Amino acid sequence: MRCPFCAHDNSQVKDSRPTEDNTAIRRRRQCEGCGARFTTFERVQLREITVVKSGDKREPFDRSKIEQSVALACRKRGVAQERLDQLVSGIQRQVETLGDGEVSAKQIGEMVMDGLRQLDSVAYIRFASVYRDFSEAKDFEDFASAVQDAAKQ
């Protein structure tokens, strides 16, 4: 593993343990060149997934993009980081087990929406405002009332 501080090619693993949700292994490493310590995470990747975006643009699946959007939607909401990690890991597993090497960005967006709806209603509305491209306050009102109506049922 290359050191992020001095770019030395070798590092020594000092500690390994599973993450809280058991979807990755956290490794604490020490660079053999400069002695700096850093952490890496090792995750299972079942297959290479390509995301098909609008206009048929294709790019490799990137878990960190989902992590960033979910974290932004849940910012200042008091949702535990462990729950966010579980949500992102669940979405990644769904994507990898779809059985196809390609998945549409729309499918991933809907998976995130479903997960956030169960996790936190405000985060759900925040994500929806960007994902569904709300352009005026009426869009928020309509969506929020639909969320309220669904919660009452």
Image: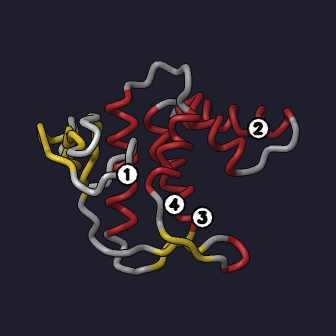
Q: Residues within 10 Å of mark 4 (few under 14, many from 20)?
A: some
Say what secondary structure mark 2 lies in: helix
Residue type pointed to by label 2: Asp
Q: Nearer the viewer, mark 3 or mark 2?
A: 3
Identify the image quadrant of the N terminus: bottom left
Looking at the image, is mark 3 or mark 1 earlier in the sequence? 1
| Cα distance between the residues tagged 1 and 4 | 35 Å
Instruction: Name the disc covering residue 102, or none.
Output: none
Look at mark 3 in the image and give the residue it sits on.
106
Determine the residue positioned at 44% across, 55% down.
63
Looking at the image, is mark 4 or mark 2 earlier in the sequence? 4
Place of residue 83 in the rendered image (x, y in percent of width and height, measured from the top left): 35, 33
| Cα distance between the residues tagged 3 and 2 | 21 Å
Determine the residue positioned at 12% across, 38% down.
14
Look at mark 1 in the image and give the residue it sits on.
7
Looking at the image, is mark 3 or mark 2 earlier in the sequence? 3
Looking at the image, is mark 2 or mark 1 earlier in the sequence? 1
Using the image, determine if residue 152 lies above or below residue 97: above
Q: Nearer the viewer, mark 1 or mark 4?
A: 1
Q: Answer yes or no: do the residues labelled 3 and 2 have beta carbons within 8 Å? A: no
Q: Residues within 10 Å of mark 2 (few under 14, many from 20)?
A: few
Indicate left or right for 98 with 39 as reference: right
Look at mark 4 in the image and give the residue it sits on.
108
Viewer-closest of 99 and 52: 52
Residue type pointed to by label 1: Ala
Residue type pointed to by label 3: Lys
Q: Nearer the viewer, mark 2 or mark 1?
A: 1
